[in-house]
Image (cartoon, grey):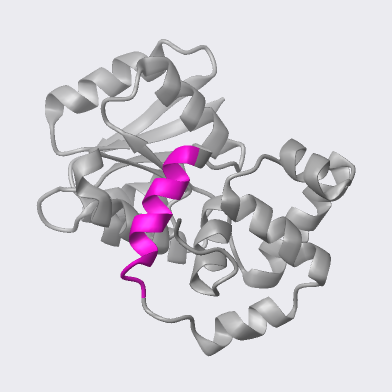
Amino acid sequence: MTTVLIVDDQALQRLGFRMLLEAQPDMTVVGEATQGGEAVRKTAELRPDVVLMDVRMPGMDGIEATRHIVESGGRSRVLVLTTFNLDEYAYEALRAGASGFFLKDAGPEELVVGIRAVAAGDSVISPGLTRKLIDAFTKSRPGHTPEQDRQLARLTEREREVLTGVATGWTNTEIAERLCLAESTVKSHVSRILTKIGARDRVQVVIFAYDVGLVRPA
């Protein structure tokens, strides 16, 4: 059973999410929060699989709340919800450690599938949307850090190729086909990349690849 904490300052929005999620046989809503500080406290208390996090809220916003939740080292993963005209908030949320990004106007089935994906440790940002977000973000990003240089140096040549594929938006199957590898081998490479660069998921892998210059904006 996937447990979810809903974080949104709009009561009707929370009600809509609750009705949708509790209609799923494999999901249960364990709590609600109306702003970031409350979200951090309830995440520590309830330890949900997924925190469905709004960005713009009074008091502590969703970005800062995401950062606190991720830095706590707990098991909960954060799926950020926002509108597309708030790109800069989405970028900052991903940097804070969110495991995915969804638009509030996404269809009900899309949201349910996204929550399941995040709970399973995957990202819910489609390759096309990932490219749009990261391309725009990297136009104003700061230079990469010495620590990122050290992390990049730990990767083998093949791991860099796989990393580039992930950042380009390819699936594991597509990477396997292009690099003439077994898909299981690609999965092993991705797992080692995550460990070597200290990333939680593919979203952070994409940001890292752009930061260190392996992939550049189109």
Measuring 43% from the left and 16% from the top, which residue is drawn there? 109
Instruction: Say if residue 173 shows up in the picture.
Output: yes
Residue 36 is a magenta residue:
no
Q: Residue at x 40, y 63 (%)?
A: 95
The stretch in magenta equals 128-141
Could you tell me residue 17's position as x and y percent? Answer: 29, 23
Assign the C terminus to one quadrant of the image: bottom left
Would you say 105 lies left or right of 216 here? left
Q: Is residue 35 left or right of residue 128?
A: left
What is the x, y in percent for residue 161? 74, 61
Above or below: residue 11 compared with residue 204: above
Q: Nearer the viewer, residue 70 or 162?
A: 162
Task: Please determine whether, in this image, residue 103 is positioned above or below residue 194.
Answer: above
Residue drawn at (49%, 62%) of the image: 207
Kindly indicate the quadrant of the structure image that contains residue 213.
bottom right
Q: Position of residue 110 (x, y in %)?
A: 43, 22
**Viewer-proximal residue, 130 or 33?**
130
Residue found at the very far left of the displayed protein: 58
Magenta-colored segment: predominant secondary structure: helix
The relative height of residue 62 versus residue 102 in the rendered view (above or below) is below
Q: Is residue 140 magenta?
A: yes
Question: 197 or 60: which is nearer to us?
Answer: 197
**Residue 150 falls left or right of residue 131:** right
Q: Is residue 100 visible?
A: no
Q: In the picture, residue 1 is in which quadrant? A: top right
Q: How many marks?
A: 0
The residue positioned 13% from the left and 28% from the top of the image is 11
